[in-house]
Amino acid sequence: MGSSSSSLNNVPDGQQLMQETGFSAAHLLRLYERFKFLDKDNRGHLRSEDFEAVPELSENPIGDRIVGAFFLPGQETVDFSSFVRVLAHFRPTEKNRTRAGAQPEPANSRNRKLKFAFRLYDRDRDGKISRTELLQVLREMLGMQVTEEQLQSIADRAIQEADLDKDDAISFDEFRKSLEKVNIDHKMSIRFLE
Amino acid sequence: MAALWPFPLLISESLWACLALTLPDGYPEPHNGPPTAGFNYSHVDPSVDQPSALRVFSLDYHHVQAPFEIVLWIMLASLAKLGFHWSGRVPAIVPESCVLIMVGLLVGGVIYGVRHSAPPTLSADAFFLFLLPPIVLDAGYFLPGRLFFENLGTILWYAVLGTLWNVLGIGLSLYGVCLLAPSSLGDISLLHCLLFGSLIAAVDPVAVLSVFQEMHVNEQLHILVFGESLLNDAVTVVLYKLFESFLRLPSVTGLDVLVGGCRVVVVGLGGLFVGLFFGLVAALTSRFTFRAQVIAPLFVFLYSYLSYLTSEMLHFSGIVAIVTCAVTMKQYVEANVSERSNTSIQYFLKMWSSVSETLIFIFLGVSTIQDIHMWSWPFVCSTLLLCLVWRATGVLLLTAVVNKLRRNAVTFRDQFIIAYGGLRGAICFSLVFLIDDFPKKRLFITTTIVVILFTVFVQGMTIKPLVELLGVKRKKRALPTVSEEIHSRVLDHLLSGIEDVVGYWGQHYWKDRFEQFNKKYLRRFLIGEHHQTHSSILRVYQEVERREQQGVEETPPAVDAHSSSRPLLPEEMDSIRRILSRNLQNFNNKQMPAYSRHTLHQDLTTDEMRKPLHRHQSLTERCTYHTITYCPQRVDGEFSKSCRGRARLSRSHTVCSASPRWSERPDSLVPAALNHTQPSDPGPAEEEQDSPQRRTQIERATKKQLSFILENEKPL
């Protein structure tokens, strides 16, 4: 396959991305090939139609949210670095990593993962998951199986449990607290991306 | 004092049993267990019964001997079990299997003392054909499916490779020991050692279950040990038969070994397919049982047993077959069959497997009292030692490899428990009796018994303190909150989506595919139309609302979105949790209760939850789906009849016949619905049904039901 560094040159900003995200060269190459595969028209960037072409993703209840998470606010295209930066959240967390205080938090830290998940809910980016936003997610997941009343009840209870400052919305800290018993590293890591 | 009263009962029972066994003169040879005892007596009767004068009172024991003895044994087993649970502090220290073996020893000793000959032993046929299947069926039916399949790779790894490692290791080392002591052990060949190794290396599901159920270790560990003990049957059976046939062949070539290797695969897969086949047929049959619901449970048992017998006939692995059958048919049967039948199935399974297990252990004890023991210190001790050593090293090595591939590593403490929890049981015992006779067979039998007793007693009794000592991660008692459930599901979907984007198969891919296949084809085909349910969220929500109405707080149900300030009842939490975990595609549900023999109660709470739910479901769903088929005339009389007793509900499906009227005339519906739902709305425990407050609340509930029904008709 040739030495990894020479093929890495084909990847735009390869070295920098490796540093930033912690992906190995081999992984970065694989992701680049996947990126090119998804980019059917060879534009160098992905649009939402390219994501929707992934068949399983369209059947995923929150598929469009996931797709939306790749796009930075206001942008209509995803270039390779944004693609990789989003996927960097899904690397397994390295344990016992000591980092100097000045370094930015790595993308696959628990906090960053939770932030990513939080943004799935909080589409308007106001820092809180409002009742309507929660209801939307629930509706997408439970679909036609439940009546509106029951959805409301489930959303009620979820907010009731998590909402500590009683503002009828879930802030990021409340979100994080409600998930403190869940093994986020396990739930949000794709093992072969390490 | 409570500890003492069962024992006189027990002793009298055993004396009675011994007396019964000593009565007949022509008792069949000790090899036949009770089930086969009856056949010799049919032609003895005429010669005995020749009354010379008319008698007022006569005793004809021979006529009923066989069933009588069987019942006595089962009675003994059950009383022993009862006594065990009543005996104060004993259950905390000694596992049930130990006590049962001790009772068996006692009874065996008494019989031996009375008759001066060996007591009846457990015949291999009786064991494999009658006593083992109920236990394995029970295990398979209550297997925590998702956990099992998540860990399937690891389980197979331990079962196949671990057993191979153990067999070869023990066999070869024993041969080495025999070579070292040629004077006493010289006539044991390599093949004999390998044969012995193959039967002694197998971890026994019965023993494992009975010990682990009393220890509440985390589910992952439990499923690993238990799954391994189930699946290594395939390997054990093949190796045993292989070495046995090698012993009969004049010489063994490499080709034979290769063929043997293929046989392992064939045996395992064959059992799997037989089980799948019968499972699907059973599911299909259960679809049509709604007209004769009383015999629905029978099909479950018949088909499972048939799958076991068929695969035994074809020399496949019967255990794999019956487990596969149970796992396959469970979800469809549960959906197809009425709630009472489900309960019957579960209760019968538990009961039979309990009795079987108890009988097995008692017979183990009884059969230990034998004339045919042969003792040899080096052989026995080295076998014991080698079993432990090889199991430990095997587990260590295999885990080291498999941890690299797993997300949740098997910790060192877990490994210790896996290695230490490798108990041997009745399977080895029966297998050793089946060996063709050769000079040292008695030595093998003795050694097997010693190993079994050692593992069950020593390892069984000390594993619990050791677990506590090592602080093995215990089962998490806390149930997840609603938020956790929701967010977990969202994260699962997220991960699945990301995996799709990245384009590699993740753990979720196959699960998703199977679920899609299941929904599209299997469920449509195997579940009757009137039971196709799309979600249980609804049912459980109705349940939750109902409980709100009858709950302690007596506040109106939270229709209004902002009225949710009261604390949640634990049952509601439970039901919501259950909704979410059952409904949303459930990938990593680690909070399943661990399978254990005596926890039908635990299952019952889920069933109690589900009973009214299924009731609701059956009421509402049947109503929606049966609008066309049932004529509306049979309504009112049947209503009161069918609503009063669940029993009748299963026979008459006329509850739903109201539905055509429901959609047409909504005003008269509410009182009708009131009558109809009122007795069934409150759960089995509620009495006061006539308070006006309750009526209004029930009205609201029925309105919700109505809205559900009307809404639910739309997507159809």
Image (tube, coloured by chain):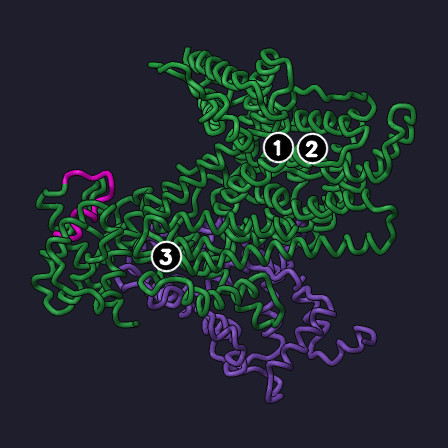
Chain colours: A purple, B green
Give the residue number, with chain letter if any, for mark 1: B123
Q: What chain does badge 3 belong to? A: B
Q: Would residue B40 appear left or right of B377 to someone viewing this image?
A: left
Quadrant of the rendering where the N terminus of chain B is positioned: top left
Q: Is residue B409 above or below residue B356?
A: below
* Predominant secondary structure, magenta span: loop
Quadrant of the rendering where the C terminus of chain B is positioned: bottom left
Q: Is residue B410 above or below residue B526?
A: above
Do the residues bearing badges 1 and 3 touch, measured as CB atoms within 8 Å? no
Do the residues bearing badges 1 and 2 touch, measured as CB atoms within 8 Å? yes
Q: Do badges 1 and 2 share one subunit?
A: yes
Q: Would residue A14 appear left or right of A140 to someone viewing this image?
A: right
Query: What residue range appears in magenta?
Result: B675-688
Give the residue number, with chain letter if any, for mark 2: B433
- Amino acid on which the number 1 mark rests in the picture: Ser
The total number of labels drawn is: 3
Which numbered dot is residue B159? none
- Amino acid on which the number 2 mark rests in the picture: Phe
- Amino acid on which the number 3 mark rests in the picture: Asn
Q: What chain does badge 2 belong to? A: B
Q: Is residue A54 magenta?
A: no
Determine the secondary structure under disc 3: helix
